[in-house]
Image: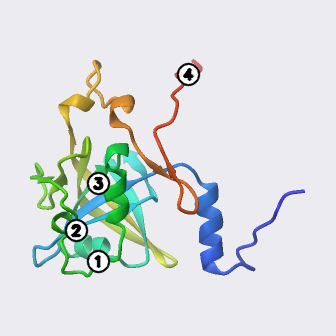
Amino acid sequence: MRTIFDPAELPPLRMYQVLTASVVPRPIAWVSTLSQDGVANLAPYSFFSVSSVNPPVVQFTSVTRKDSLHNIEATGEFVINLATEPLMAVINSSSAAFDRDVDEFAELGIETELSEQVRPVRVAGSPVAIECTLKQVVPVGDSFVVMGDVVTVAVRPEAVADDGLPDFTKLAPLSRLGRNEWGLPPHVVTLDRPQ
């Protein structure tokens, strides 16, 4: 007999806990933005995916209105930095509720580098940075799906495989699981699709 979780009978926090413990693992978008006043912001989001490849569009979801969302709506730009195992402690630290006028990069000692086509800086230590311009924000209940047109994907040279693509084993990507659990890079199996 299965345990049944009925959204009509559960408080929102409990439903959030059920869903985040069920939809696992989830990649983490470490989103860097810039406020209209020029204050840098950096925060992790574990509701993150690719929306389209032609045109290239990525998305992440902000549960409630957070600083990242305010900045993106004001400036139309953001960067998704890949969250990786060597950066796990500082990624977690950047999830704290800093005041809007606090630069998380400076506060946490995170090294930056200039982006190619957008104003928000990239995380220098992240192996992949996806620079985006705002496509649209879709309100869904208490959340906001932020969709970005990809204008540049910048990959550090040590993370590129012989075929010219990012190498999963060199990326060491993190994921979020349920509760306070994080997923480390998993064992990889290669399996071709049927013809």
Where disc 1 sits, the SS reads loop
Of tags 1 and 4, the one toward the viewer is: 1
Q: Position of residue 93 (x, y in %)?
A: 34, 64
Crowd class of label 4 (few under 14; some 14 to 19; many from 20; radius 10 Å)? few
Residue 76 visible here: no
Choose top left, top right, bottom left or bottom right for residue 37. bottom left
Kindly identify the residue that appears in the image at 18 percent across and 53 percent down. Answer: 122
What residue does disc 2 label? Answer: 104
The numbered dot on residue 80 is 3
45, above or below 53, in the image: below
For the N terminus, the image quarter is bottom right
For the C terminus, the image quarter is top right
Where disc 4 sits, the SS reads loop
Of tags 3 and 1, the one toward the viewer is: 1
Query: How far apart in space, not on screen, are marks 3 and 4 (Cα)?
Result: 28 Å
Residue type beneath disc 2: Glu
What residue does disc 4 label? Answer: 191
Residue type beneath disc 1: Phe
Query: First in sequence: mark 1 or mark 4?
Result: 1
